[in-house]
Amino acid sequence: MRTLVIGKGAREHALCWALSSTTRVSELYCAPGNAGTAGLARNLPLDPFDSVGIISAVRELGIELVIVGPEAPLAAGLGDALQAANIAVFGPGRKASLLEASKAEARAFCQRHGIPCAPTVHFSPATGLGDLKAYLEANRGRTLVLKKSGLAAGKGVLESKDTGELLNFGEAVLCNDELLAEEYLEGRELSLPVLLTEAGHLPLPALGGHKRALAGDRGPSTGGMGAFSPLPFASPELLAQIQKDIIAPSLEGMAKEGLLYRGVLVFGVMATPAGPRLLDYNVRFGDPETQVLLPRLEGDFAALCAAISRGGAIPRPDFSARYACGVVVAAPGYPISHSRGLPVDLSALGGSVSLGQPGIELGSDPGEAGAKALLFQAATGRDGEGGIRTGGGRCFTAVGLGQDWSKARDRAYEVAGMVAFEGAWFRPDIGDSVFSAGPSRS
Ligand code: GLY
């Protein structure tokens, strides 16, 4: 099966790695890809927003399946264009993408279908700043969460109790977008990917992560600074409650409104003492969550994606009992503004990693099968001398794997520390707040 992955992040490097490990994929392409995907797939210099160019490449190369990684091309209608051209696609059309691309639409959807969320107030540019000022004044001293309605690569959220900071953020958003103000929810956050077709759905393992830039979950919001799986507090009881309160009514609502699609829908959930609350929907695989999910998948990822894109029964995949910890290595200045084009030295990790093969053997551990660690690249490119250069804010995801959490964590940090470029940094505490209670698991 000739397969094309759209995107250039570490998520897409992980998707290409999982697809290239199966015999089912005869030719693998990535558009536009990065220096890592080039070691596993043929990179095509196509713009993910150029649906005409993508369709013509798909026809010319006989590509049978397109998997869309990022949300923005889906929100721009790439899924619809591929479907209209009769090309099998993993990912929704524009209308369903609004569940992610418009938080205002998503909240309205939740209200229509009784899906529990934080109490939310909606402000539009037309209402002006007056209403926001009055709301902030009435809630002075309370922690509030302000969210830009449209896509913002995870950065359109501010959690604060500082009225001045909230007002500045809200004013900037209201220049060109709608704004949501939500009550701050206390609880434990998790991410639940659910594979989806018009005919059925299948939840995958729950994932944890950290969205704030700095240790202790402080600092500005990011697309995600790390992720981990399995998640010790995701008990069968909690997952059953999320299924009943959130997943089932969401899918029923989508069916009623003609929004079901073939792909993955990720439920961002806060488990609060009063029950689970939906934080957001993502209509594609998460980044960096995918980088810790796929290394635990046992079985044929290509077969799974192909079955979903055909709308058939979803095969139930197995996941290994190993722990996975993913640490994002970021560029200096991220997430505010970041340098690009920094030369990267991966030589400490060995030649094959520099060539885009993510697997890393770290020492020997008799009895432990499989790679001990992986390094996924994001938006990297090659310079004139063949060296690797950074291209984005979140430049790499170092993933450690192990039979227990501390091994997975130590390995992730060992690899993250070997990724060398000027100003490289990462959060030092991925998973600590969750696993400090001990490695109990469900
Ligand atoms: N890590 C969250 C996201 O993929 O948007």
Image (cartoon, grey):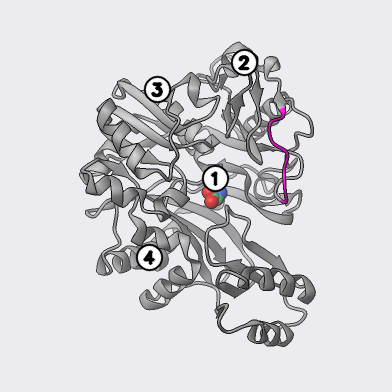
Residue 267 horizontal/vertical position (percent)? 46, 57
Q: Which residue is mark 3?
A: 21
Is 359 part of what is drawn in magenta?
Answer: no
Q: CA distance from mark 1 to mark 2?
A: 44 Å
**Residue pictured at 41% horizontal, 62% vertical:** 98
Of the 4 image quadrants, the one containing the N terminus is top left
Q: Name which residue type carries label 3.
A: Ser
In the image, residue 412 sits, relative to residue 21, either above or below, namely: below
Residue 355 horizontal/vertical position (percent)? 56, 16
Magenta stretch mostly in which secondary structure?
A: loop
- Numbered disc 3: secondary structure: loop
What count of labels does the image hold? 4
- Numbered disc 4: secondary structure: helix
**Residue pictured at 59% horizontal, 43% vertical:** 227
Q: CA distance from mark 3 to mark 4?
A: 35 Å
Nearest the viewer among 296 and 264 is 264
Q: Are marks 1 and 3 in contact (CB under 8 Å)?
A: no
Q: Which residue is mark 1?
A: 441
- Numbered disc 1: secondary structure: loop
Q: Name which residue type carries label 1.
A: Arg
Nearest the viewer among 318 and 134 is 134
Residue 74 horizontal/vertical position (percent)? 40, 51
What segment carries the magenta color?
Answer: 336-342
Nearest the viewer among 53 and 390 is 53
Q: Which residue is mark 4?
A: 244
Q: CA distance from mark 1 to mark 4?
A: 22 Å
Pair 1/4: label in front? 4
Q: Name which residue type carries label 4.
A: Lys
Tell me the tag on residue 9.
none
Within 10 Å of disc 1 (Cα), the crowding (few <14, some 14-19, many 20+) is few
Nearest the viewer among 360 and 38 is 38
